Amino acid sequence: MPRISERQRQARRQQILDAARGVFTLNGFHATSMDDIIAAAGMSSGGVYRYFAGKDAIITAIAQEVVGTVTATVSDLLGEDRLPPLGDVLRRLVTQIDTIADGAGRLALQVWGEAQRDPEVARLAAVEATTLRSAVLDLVRRAHAAGQLPEDTDVEALGQVLFSLIPGYLLQKRIIGDVDPVRYADAIDAMLRIR
């Protein structure tokens, strides 16, 4: 049997994740079986199980991708030599959340719900959320050091509050549907200027 390259291996793994994401988005985690994922991936059960031990492992991988998308945006901003105004940074984050709301964002809500039931998903969700919150806190610290915030700002508390606005936007977008990313970002910017 010919060996497959690392690139082919990654492509097959991604094929499984893409198929699972589609089925999870339609049916949710609990109503989706491994057979559903295998059929959607168009692979044999042995082929799928070669990459993932089961549905929980697939959920975990998807959760990492979902949160990684947002975390990457924050990391990109942290990598810039000169930090833009904090309001602009948060505007970019809200825009990023808006673009993933109907796909990965929908799954993010399912992951958070699953975290209430499954300790492994809860652990992963906590790690990923902590990573994202730490990145937001780093942004706030840099903005404070750059003089964008009052000297007496409780930087850690502000980081926690600003972090909560990210899942808050997603929740409103997915559940209520009437939230506008531009107005939301404008309101964040206005809050930052209140003194």
Image (cartoon, grey):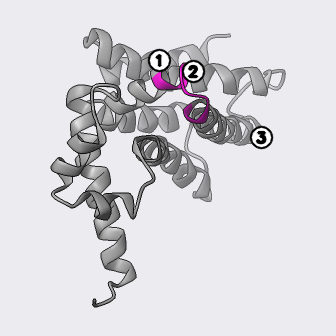
At mark 3, the secondary structure is helix
Q: Is residue 79 left or right of residue 14?
A: right
Q: Is residue 177 above or below residue 26?
A: above
The residue located at (36%, 70%) in the rendering is 10
The circle drawn on residue 107 is none
- The one nearer the camera, 6 or 35, is 35
Q: What's drawn in magenta, residue-wise?
A: 114-121
In which image quadrant can residue 48 be found? bottom left
The circle drawn on residue 164 is 2
Q: Is residue 68 magenta?
A: no
Distance between mark 1 and mark 3 Cα atoms:
27 Å
Disc 2 vs disc 3: which is toward the camera? Answer: 2
Kind of residue indicated by mark 1: Gly
Q: Is residue 194 left or right of residue 29?
A: right
Per the image, the residue denoted by label 3 is 145
Q: Is residue 189 visible?
A: no
The residue located at (54%, 45%) in the rendering is 74
Kind of residue indicated by mark 3: Ala
Per the image, the residue denoted by label 1 is 168
Distance between mark 2 and mark 3 Cα atoms:
22 Å
**Circles 2 and 1 in contact, beta carbons < 8 Å:** yes
- The one nearer the camera, 125 or 76, is 125
Q: Is residue 166 visible?
A: yes
Q: Is residue 81 above or below residue 99?
A: below
